[in-house]
Image (tube, rainbow, N blue to C red):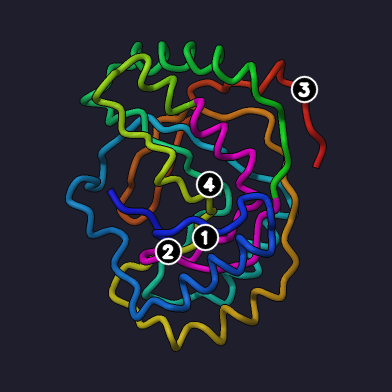
Amino acid sequence: MTAFPSRLPDDLDDLDVIRSHDWKSFSSLDRMQNHWARPEWPSGRRAYYWMLPFDGTDLVQLAKQCQARLEDPRFDLVPLDALHLTVGRVGFTEQVAAEVATTTADAARKRCLRLSPFKVEIGPLAGSRGALRFSVSPWSSLFPMHQALADAVRDVVGDRAHMNTRYFRPHLSIAYANTDVAVRPLLPMIDELRDLPPVTAAVSEVALVELRREGTVYRFDTLLSVSLGSGPTVSA
């Protein structure tokens, strides 16, 4: 398993450090790759995932502004009603039964009681090997949440668990490359979009979803949600 960027930023709590690290990592790439060239994830396959769905008006508007500049046949835009931060995979549906996923959620509720709701800032735009995506920061609260969920999955499925916090790189994708794309010609346009101010989002729960690939789009149905701590709402 690999992560992008391969190295963690120097400070998981400093927004500017994280954003700069994301941008420098993307800018250093020569080419983007076809995100959909994934033999293990063919169209129609489904999986249980932990996810943070985001549908706030400010975020939708930010994504819409950026996507308007990304109308390009080399990219598949993420539907505005499906914006999300992927936390980690519980397992593919043919490998993990629905009742096992539910049991994992019960384990996650216990582990997430020690956490507290928090806020993140989404933006500016950067990218990875296969997607154009917003930086999400800080990471200092996201990592303990990921570790709690990874531990919960391991509690239930043991060595079959796929989640490993060392590979977690929080981000929110808005467009996937569907072919090989040179990065350097993209940079001036993306750099302009980076001037758009980030938006703030509250995180008080994490969703267990059934994610499916429909051609060049991901769609998901929320099965249940797990609160962080006792679950008080944090206003954005």
Q: Which residue is mark 3?
A: 232
Residue 120 placement (x, y as % from top left): 69, 47
Q: Amino acid at mark 1?
A: Ile
Q: Which mark is residue 99?
A: none
Mark 2 crowd level (few <14, some 14–19, many ≥20, 10 Å Cα): many
Q: Is residue 160 above or below residue 122?
A: above
Q: Which mark is residue 174?
A: 1
The answer to whether the residue labelled 2 contacts the one labelled 1, judged by CB atoms less than 8 Å apart, is yes
Q: Is residue 233 above or below residue 217?
A: above
Residue 119 placement (x, y as % from top left): 73, 42
The answer to whether the residue labelled 3 contacts the one labelled 2, judged by CB atoms less than 8 Å apart, is no
Task: Measure the alpha-carbon separation of dots 1 and 4.
Answer: 9 Å
Q: Which residues are magenta?
A: 121-148
Q: Which residue is mark 2?
A: 131
Q: Which mark is residue 82?
A: 4
Q: Is residue 132 magenta?
A: yes
Q: Is residue 44 above or below residue 182?
A: above
Mark 3 crowd level (few <14, some 14–19, many ≥20, 10 Å Cα): few
Frontmost of labels 3 and 1 is 3
Q: Amino acid at mark 2?
A: Ala
Counting residues from the N terminus, which is met first, the one under dot 3 or under dot 1? 1
Q: Amino acid at mark 4?
A: Ala
Query: What secondary structure is found at the residue carrying circle 3?
Result: loop
